[in-house]
Image: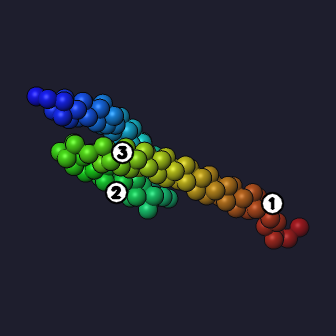
Amino acid sequence: MGWLGGLGTALALVACASAPPAPDAAIAAAVDAIYHAEDARVSDYAAQELRTAREKLDGARDAAQKAQQDHSAKGLRQAQWLAEEAQADAQYAEAKAERERAQAAVKQLERSLQTLTTPSGGGV
């Protein structure tokens, strides 16, 4: 085999050992965050943000699949990053929707209070 063959084997082992793990956990966390956001009906208030989260999740899945086929550490890192972004976007969409709902409830309460405190205009 010779020393060059041994060096090549050693380099291959180092390359495999330094490859990042598959982003399965990050993708699963993103899926959970998106399902949770969908269950909270955020699309009424944060449809674009939820759409962005879904697109990034699709990108993460595609990048992970391609990276595993190509044995690409860079692709695995990209898939991990996209999955984390998808999770963050879904959580942001949920928070935005909660804020919008709360603001709508405050406005409704203000209208109700104004109705209660406004004189009816009837004669005495």
Give residue 120's position: percent from left, percent from top: 79, 67
Question: Which callout, 3 or 2, points to the residue nearer the camera?
Answer: 3
Does residue 117 appear left or right of residue 106 in this picture? Answer: right
Mark before the other along the chain sequence, 3 or 1: 3
Does residue 111 appear left or right of residue 59 in this picture? Answer: right
What amino acid is found at the position of numbered circle 1 in the picture?
Answer: Thr
Question: Which callout, 3 or 1, points to the residue nearer the camera?
Answer: 3
- What's the mark number on residue 117? 1
Q: Quick one: which residue is furthest to the right in this view?
A: 124
67, 6: nearer the viewer: 6
Which residue is labeled 3 in the image?
Answer: 77
What amino acid is found at the position of numbered circle 2 in the picture?
Answer: Glu
Residue that appears at 14% across and 29% down? 2
- Distance in Å between CA atoms under marks 1 and 2: 49 Å
Which quarter of the picture shows residue 27?
top left
Relative to 109, say whether 26 is above or below: above
User: For the residue carrying disc 2, how many other residues have a C-alpha within 10 Å: few (<14), some (14-19), or many (20+)?
Assistant: some
What amino acid is found at the position of numbered circle 3 in the picture?
Answer: Arg
- What's the mark number on residue 55? 2
Query: Mark 3 touching mark 1, by CB under 8 A?
Result: no
Give residue 25's position: percent from left, percent from top: 35, 34
Mark before the other along the chain sequence, 3 or 2: 2
